[in-house]
Image (spheres, rainbow, N blue to C red):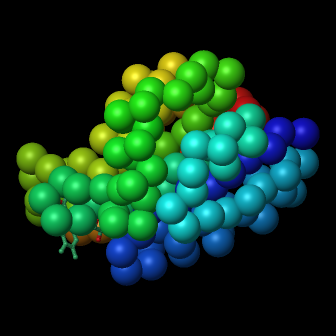
Amino acid sequence: MTNILILVGTESGNAQMVADALKPVLEGAGHAVDVSDKAAGKADLEAHDVLLVICATHGSGDIPTNILPLAETLERERPDLSGHRYGIIALGDMTYQDTFCGGGKKVDRVLELCGAKRVGDRLEVDASTQPLPDEEALTWVEGWKSLV
Ligand SMILES: Cc1cc2nc3c(=O)[nH]c(=O)nc-3n(C[C@H](O)[C@H](O)[C@H](O)COP(=O)(O)O)c2cc1C
């Protein structure tokens, strides 16, 4: 059994919807799963073996405000997360072109800077072609859940 923290970065609820869809799937695979959309601290990350970050993009390639303080803390303090693994589901919209999925890409980079190891490929969900982000995420998690 793996302790997984699903960290939700959202402004308007899509990322939360994805988290709600994935939680029972991961629990069904035998993992213990917590979900947080609050400004989780480093201690929350360190208490879990694996992080699954589901992160929307707002502004111009920006991380949603609910997890921005955490991302900034990690970037500034660079805690040692080398014993931790993570997955990333980035939500975005291709019509934003250069900043597509920028929020999830930034969180991916910050976790890598802290030494965490990404498991599986980053999933990037395009709202302009996929109005139901949980569908793509449910397919992706079938592979990811067996890697963690
Ligand atoms: C004001 C605004 C700005 C956005 N900026 C970007 C962006 O720069 N890049 C991108 O890929 N998507 C952008 N998006 C699309 C959102 O990331 C996408 O709709 C996502 O599914 C929203 O997830 P949420 O409901 O969890 O916040 C933007 C959406 C809004 C409303």
User: Is residue 83 shown above or below 140?
Assistant: above
| The one of 18 and 60 positioned closer to us in this rendering | 60
Q: Quarter holding the C terminus?
A: top right
User: Is residue 58 shown above or below 2?
Assistant: below
The quarter of the picture showing ligand 1: bottom left
User: Is residue 124 shown above or below 21?
Assistant: above
The answer to whether residue 71 is left or right of residue 135 is left
The answer to whether residue 31 is left or right of residue 78 is right
The answer to whether residue 141 is left or right of residue 68 is right
Total marks in image: 0
At x 63% / y 30%, what residue is drawn?
85
**Residue 131 in the image, given as x and y percentages of width and height:** 36, 74
Which quadrant of the structure image shows residue 74? top left
The answer to whether residue 128 is left or right of residue 35 is left
| The one of 6 and 140 positioned closer to us in this rendering | 6
At x 90% / y 39%, what residue is drawn?
1
At x 83% / y 57%, what residue is drawn?
27
Q: Is residue 134 visible?
A: no
**Residue 110 in the image, given as x and y percentages of width and height:** 39, 33
**Residue 142 in the image, given as x and y percentages of width and height:** 68, 46
At x 75% / y 42%, what residue is drawn?
47
Which quadrant of the structure image shows residue 143? top right
Residue farthest front in this picture: 77
**Residue 6 in the image, given as x and y percentages of width and height:** 63, 55
| The one of 75 and 94 positioned closer to us in this rendering | 75
Residue farthest bottom in this picture: 12
